Amino acid sequence: MRKPIIAGNWKMYKTISQAIELANGLKRELYKIDSQDIDIVLCPPFTALTEVGEVIYGSNLQLGAQDLHWEDEGAFTGEVSGLFLKDVGVKYVIIGHSERRQFFGETNASVNKKIKAALRNGLVPIVCVGENLKEREENKTFDVIRDHIENGLKDISQEDAFKLVIAYEPVWAIGTGKTATPSQAQEAQKFIRDLLSKMYNNSVAQDIRIQYGGSVKPENIAELIKQPDIDGALVGGASLKVDSFSAIVKNTLGAE
Ligand code: 13P
């Protein structure tokens, strides 16, 4: 049985004081939830990692970052490494988000190097994959997913593959209010699990958690999480408010 994982990707929102307020609110709202039942991850911007880490220290909430560099240190102006994320108490790191692929030149090759850097530093990679609208309309969804998974996970050993979280985020559903239907998400996520089974083996494929991301809301999480290959959510907009993010967490557990 895979443990559900709900992660909030705060993107480029929340100053330090706003981040502290949100983290405190979530801690208050979610304190009764047993961390044995669900992983809850907050991914604030780099600038607020330390303070959010302090607020949630010792609670059932865990700290995640939104990106990392593939080297541990060096002359890479403006970058943040896995070593430094570890240093501020980060446990998870989002890699290959579609916004990074679209606006910042992220490729499968850089995703691959970043996954290795995260693993080397003991961080759990949340690897994002998914097609855009044009690709879906041209029936290329599975080709794109296969490309992201096969090349993104190139040379990742079976032993390391167990540690990954995959997030299926169809680009056309991100920030648009247009959620993939539970059956569309399930179809893609089953495809991902079958692919992982071929690349590794069934036991690895059955262990890896696959999140859905794209306009997840308190109202749609229950139907999504009921799907056999959806093990959680990567939440953008709805993770920025205490009410909506805590309702998503609670509805995830309620639906099980
Ligand atoms: P929205 O939930 O705002 O659609 O964003 C999804 C996302 O990109 C999470 O990483």
Image (tube, rainbow, N blue to C red):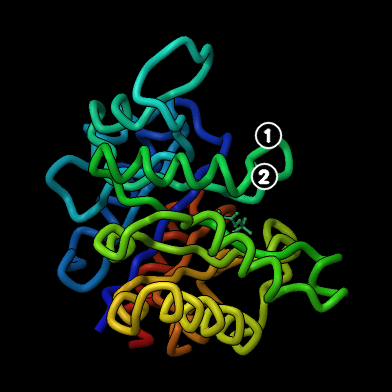
Q: Position of residue 3 (x, y in %)?
A: 27, 74
Viewer-side residue, 76 vs 103:
76
Q: Residues within 10 Å of mark 2 (few under 14, many from 20)?
A: some
| Residue 7 vertical placement versus 158 (above, below) | above
Amino acid type, mark 1: Phe
Q: Quadrant of the C terminus?
A: bottom left
Ligand 1 is located in which of the four quadrants? bottom right
Q: Amino acid at mark 2?
A: Arg
Q: Is residue 210 visible?
A: yes
Distance (Cα) linking label 2 and label 1: 6 Å
Residue 17 appears in the rendering: no
Q: Is residue 188 above or below residue 72?
A: below
- Res 245 quadrant in image: bottom left
- Picture coordinates of residue 148, whole percent (x, y): 60, 60
Residue 54, disc = none
Residue 90: x and y in percent read 28, 38
Q: Residue at x 42, y 68 (%)?
A: 247
| Residue marked by disc 1 | 104
